[in-house]
Amino acid sequence: MIPTPGAFLRVGVILLLAVVLQISGFAQMRILGASANLIPLAVAGVAFFGGSVPGAASGFAAGLLLDLALGHTAGTSSLVLTAVGYGAGRYREVRDPAHGLAPMAFGLAATAGYLLALGGVTFMLGVEASVSLLVLRDVVVTVLLNGLLALPVFWLLGRTLRGALVSDPLARGRRQRTREAGPIGLRGLEV
């Protein structure tokens, strides 16, 4: 990602919109007892298109904004989302997935990693909560819902971040046209 003021503004608006939509809308919509979570999708999307450093920075910003908005222990979501953003961006830098369903895999992995790591961090901090096997059902349903939401969310993020990226993810590469060659023995002689 090219570090310009426009790029920072785009990522900031994306993260603010994701946190506001998650808190005000998606958290209240229950499907099979669980709700979708836009925040790990937004962080993974920025990491998918921008790389590991923008992914980690956006994860920290989104996590801090989420913790402050909900009144949770400051830093728990930031820590987890920073790791999610860095991991997704690093995987993208090393592997460069070209398949059309790669955003779905990124969304599934980012959501599963976020939910499991957030559960572990809150457990280590001693936050009192009742835990049962229904939590695992909620995690599975949330991961599947985010997997379904990943394709449209990543498409929208790709469109939004398109001008700030080093390489355009939506441009289709074409082969170069082969140049005309003369007889084999006369190449380079300009005959």
Image (cartoon, rainbow, N blue to C red):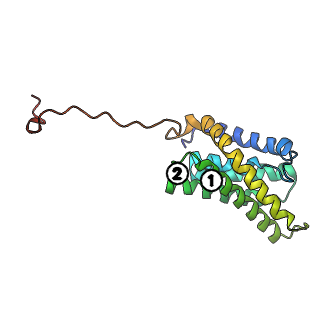
- Residue 170 % position (x, y): 53, 36
Task: Residue 105: give its label.
Answer: 1
Q: Residue furthest top?
A: 191
Residue type pointed to by label 1: Ala
Taking 156 as reference, is 97 left or right?
left
Residue in the image at 31% along x and 33% along y: 177
Q: Is residue 131 above or below residue 112?
A: below
Residue type pointed to by label 2: Pro
Question: In this view of the protein, can residue 102 be seen by the observer?
Answer: yes
> What residue would you read off at disc 2?
97
Quadrant showing the N terminus: top right
Quadrant showing the C terminus: top left
> 175 or 27: nearer the eye?
175
Determine crowd level at label 2: few under 14, some 14-19, many 20+ residues with C-alpha closer than 10 A. Answer: some
Question: In this view of the protein, can residue 6 be seen by the observer?
Answer: no
Task: Residue 144: give its label.
Answer: none
- Residue 65 % position (x, y): 78, 48
Taking 115 as reference, is 129 left or right?
right
